[in-house]
Image: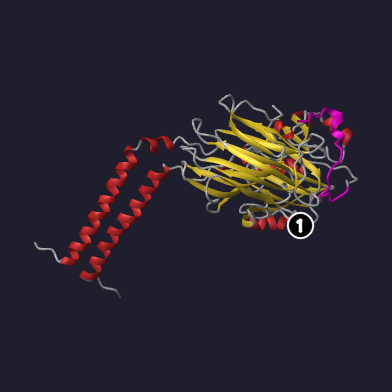
Amino acid sequence: MMTWTRGSQRKVAALIGFVLAFGLGGLLAGGAFFGGATQKPHTGLSISAGPLPDRCRNAPTTIEAAQALDPQVAVAPNSDLANMSSLSLVVWCPYPTLVERFQSWAWIVIEPNPVADPVNEFTQVSSDNQGVILTQVNGSPGIESSPDPSLQRPGAVEFVSGGDYVGVYGNGSIPLAGLIGIADSIVFPSTPSPSPSAGTSPTSDPSTTVGVVTP
Amino acid sequence: MLWRSDTRIGVASLLGGLFVVLVLGGQWALDPSIAAATSCTTNPQAQVEAQGINSNGNGYSNAIGEKTDIWINPSQNDTCPRVSSIGVMYTATGSVAEAGYWEQSGYSTTVFLEWWTPITGYGEKDAGSPGSADQYRTFRIQDLNQDGVWSAFIGSTNYDSTPNIGGSLVEGTPLDNGERHLSTDSEYAQFNNMEGYPANGAGYTYVYDITMYLDTDGSSGYNCIWESYVSNYVKQQTPTCSGY
């Protein structure tokens, strides 16, 4: 058992002095030099994240027009938080990626699936990112994450079904359970579109027939 | 009572520590620039972004990488952070992988990698200095094998990579970005030789042209200035990028 000697008392006193001098002093010096603004800011490219129409660079369309153009992609949910009658925005972003936003501020992004091995992909994403959890949506593989303001995470469910990659997102205030309910309510046409489509470079944009505005 | 010498050493150290604390604490309390810095916003107060477009006049939507020279200019005497960066954004979700540098108070610049997707949220890594001022440094952000891991380069050095951020950012639009976090600061940024790497493409190629992508700076004066089909500025001048 260690006993306190005068020598050790001296060392402790000296240690406290050094801590005050170089610890607290250093902290205050840092505060002085950097003014409390040393924290890396969230930069602009990410801060406007979300389905902003001006980022999509297309004019809004209707779900009916979208379904006429591509019934495989233009699917719609049927839940209290998101259904055909509560649609507030439908826009190709660009074709063949469709964004739907609802009055609840839930929003959906649907596109032909670009992921060759969804189970493996989702497993890796879940493993690499804290709070991202493997899930299933109507038996299809997926991942989900709860809203988290500290990470600017709005709440999300992503899954692959019917040849589509589907993301169902919130606005930070919709509970994950509500987003799962939206995902569960989506019914896909029986005939899936070709998959995967990773790396394809669209040479034409059929959505121009429904009012695309180019930059 | 006489103090022993070892006790005096300890007390002297304590007093010395308190002296340093008081002196620096006083400086911190009195310096008005320090108080002003607390008004810096976490999110940018203004930003100007430009995008590379294809020959058909549309923005890229299938870039799996971007390579652009960014001017290292840390002499703006800013009070709050100023950012010059490039990135690939999947516009449908706003998912983005971004590389560049940020400047703190006019004398310190730091290279960073940042990402955001709705499923993973926000992440960021700092990676040291971009080098001396008043030169272009080539930044690159890419996921050439589309495995969800985006790698950031300065010159030929891969200074960091994202975790696997998944299928909501497989490809996107190449952008450059100038931003500030205090309305009275500079938003100056300078970009040259914007190149995109199209999915299934043969490699990096110059964009066909650069157009305005986003401007939240209002009428305060910083705008997208078209310099050539592969270069642009963010500076106080009448805007010349198309897309306004």
Q: Residues within 10 Å of mark 1 (few under 14, many from 20)?
A: some
Quadrant hosting residue A214: top right
Rendered location of residue A111, percent (x, y): 80, 43
- Find residue B23 and report its horizontal and vertical position in percent: 28, 46
Kindly identify the residue that appears in the image at 49 percent across and 40 percent down.
B75
Relative side of A161 to B243, left or right: right
Q: Is residue A210 magenta?
A: yes
SS at mark 1? Answer: helix
Image quadrant in which the N terminus of chain B is located = bottom left
Outermost residue toward the left?
A: B1
- For the residue marked with disc 1, what is the amino acid? Val
Q: Which residue is mark 1?
A: A119
The image quadrant that residue B35 belongs to is top left
Q: Is residue B72 visible?
A: yes
Q: Residue furthest bottom?
A: A1
Image coordinates for residue A188, horizontal then vertical, percent: 84, 43
Q: Where does the magenta region start and end? A: A194-215
> Which chain does tag 1 point to?
A
- Secondary structure mainly formed by the magenta segment: loop
Q: Is residue B95 magenta?
A: no
Q: Nearer the viewer, residue B213 or A61?
A: B213
Viewer-proximal residue, A94 or A204?
A204
- Of the 4 image quadrants, the one containing the C terminus of chain B is top right
Q: How many marks?
A: 1
- Residue A84 percent location from the top left of the image: 79, 31
